[in-house]
Image (cartoon, rainbow, N blue to C red):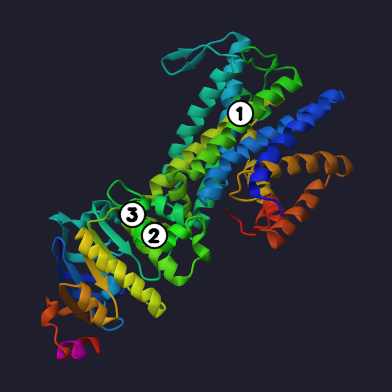
Amino acid sequence: MLEVRDLTARYGASQALFGVDLTVAEGQAVALMGRNGMGKTTTVKAICRIIPSQGTLTLEGKDLHRLPSFRVARLGVGLVPEGRRCFRDLTVRENLLATARPGDWTLQSVTALFPRLGERAGQRAASLSGGEQQMLAIGRALMTNPRLLILDEATEGLAPIIRQEIWAAIARLRQETGMAILLIDKSIRELAQVSDRAVIVERGQTVWQGAMSDLTPEITERFVGV
Amino acid sequence: MIGERWINLAVPLALLAVPLYALMADEPFTITLATRATILALAAVGLNIALGIGGLVSLGHAVFFGLGGYAMGILAFHAQNYSPLEIGPLTFAGTKSMPVIWLVAVIVSAMAALLIGALSLRTSGVYFIMITLAFGQMFYYFAISWSAYGGEDGLSIYVRNGFPGLNTLVPIQFFAVCFVVLCLALALNAMLRASPFGLALNAARQVPQRVETVGLNPMRLKLMAFVISGAITGLAGALFADLNRFVSPSMFSWQLSGELIILIVIGGVGRLMGPVVGACLFVALEHWLGGLTDFWHVWLGVVLLGIVLFARGGVVGLLTGKAGPHV
């Protein structure tokens, strides 16, 4: 489905990616791992065409390099960005409706996945807790009816009980929809539970990729530092 | 604090009450003042779509106001002189019919907004302000040198244009026409802001980069908003020209663009009734303070300073207790 090969990217004069390789097959969940500052978020930004990049970047054979960011999203790439960034002045309901595209995901199905969003439908996004904002960011991405969902640090900085709730929702997404997911997170235990494969980047390069079951403690200690 | 729904209901009713009282008290000039406030409110309702929802600080909205005015002036000029209007190989007759003039004003303003927006929206921030200002000045100086239609002196239209079934020269009847148009524009504005388009435009104002990653094209959203905004302001220009029965290049002036922004800021940026409250206050201050001193703009400046420093939600924000500049 998503194929990334030898991806390079730079922020002005400073090069951030030196050759990232990763693939996400239909219905597969892939964990993108690595220490802080190694290029995980930059890879996601390049996939979503938020920053320019070079190399192979295709979604179902279509070259994403030729497309602006909004076209990539319309092709079916839904991003839950690091830091949530909900539309603060809009209510929960309006946040979800603003991004809605035709498909199975509707206001009802999103609020069924995250009942808290249903309870706070009329509340402004700015007044939600961090965890609720994160749920809203995931719901907003789902409302675009993506075929590939990218979650960038979806549980970062959240209370353990909220993290559990979000991981449970991700597991439900996997079981019930079979949606392809690319995950970035620091919780290796939870990543291992929901992911089929793992890709590890270090200094802007893919240094390991394989089945989650092949990811040994030695590899994670060496490349992820855990 | 008062709920915004009550304000949305009370403000048009209050605006309607003023000329009705003036009619009973036999004060036709007050009706004309209320009509002026209504038309300025309509122009600002148009600008508020771009500025309030879309966050586009256009310092060139007088272009659309002026185009609406000149659409009225030119069509009525040819009608009153019984001379044909020739555009290239095409020949049109002038008209004194308000609905036809409005249609032309809306189409011309929308087309101009499409062109100006397509170029200006490639920029943002201070560059957007400057480029819209530049377009405004271009139109202003063009109108000054357009001697066929009065140049600097402008065009006088001797008889107000007609509306089927009404005598528009009767102040209360012309007010009624303007008031209904304003109410329709407010209804359109309310529907727009609650529609997926309005929500997406609002989102594009708040986090432009993020809307792209959810599949929305911020450029297209803003351009559509700019076109709708320009069309409504153009319609207000046609009515304003009819109110004064006079069109001049000052309708294109950057001061007028600035005044439209000022009255939105006074009323409340992004609030449905912000432009109406702002326009009413502006006209009231212009009338009362203008009668006391020639330097009434200084006092308007003081009001504006107070609002910008202490009440960023404008008068509507003060009344509702929601201090933010946007809803």
Q: Is residue B234 magenta?
A: no
* Crowd band around label 3 with a 10 angstrom C-alpha radius: few (<14), some (14–19), many (20+): some
Q: Which residue is drawn at the image coordinates 20% and 65% (left, top)?
A: A54
B274 versus B30 height, above or below: below
Q: Earlier in the sequence, mark 1 or mark 2?
A: 1
Q: Name the element at disc 3.
A: helix
Labels 3, 2: one chain:
no
Residue B147 is left or right of residue A67, and the answer is right
Q: Are marks 3 and 1 in contact (CB under 8 Å)?
A: no
The amino acid marked with disc number 1 is: Val
In the rendered image, which residue does mark 3 sit on? A109
Q: Position of residue A136 (x, y in %)?
A: 40, 62
Residue nearer the viewer, A162 or A134: A162
In the rendered image, which residue does mark 1 sit on? B181
Task: Please give the range of residues in magenta.
Answer: A218-222
Chain at numbered mark 2: B
Q: Name the element at disc 2.
A: helix
Q: Position of residue A82 (x, y in %)?
A: 36, 70
> Would residue B141 be visible to someone looking at this image?
no
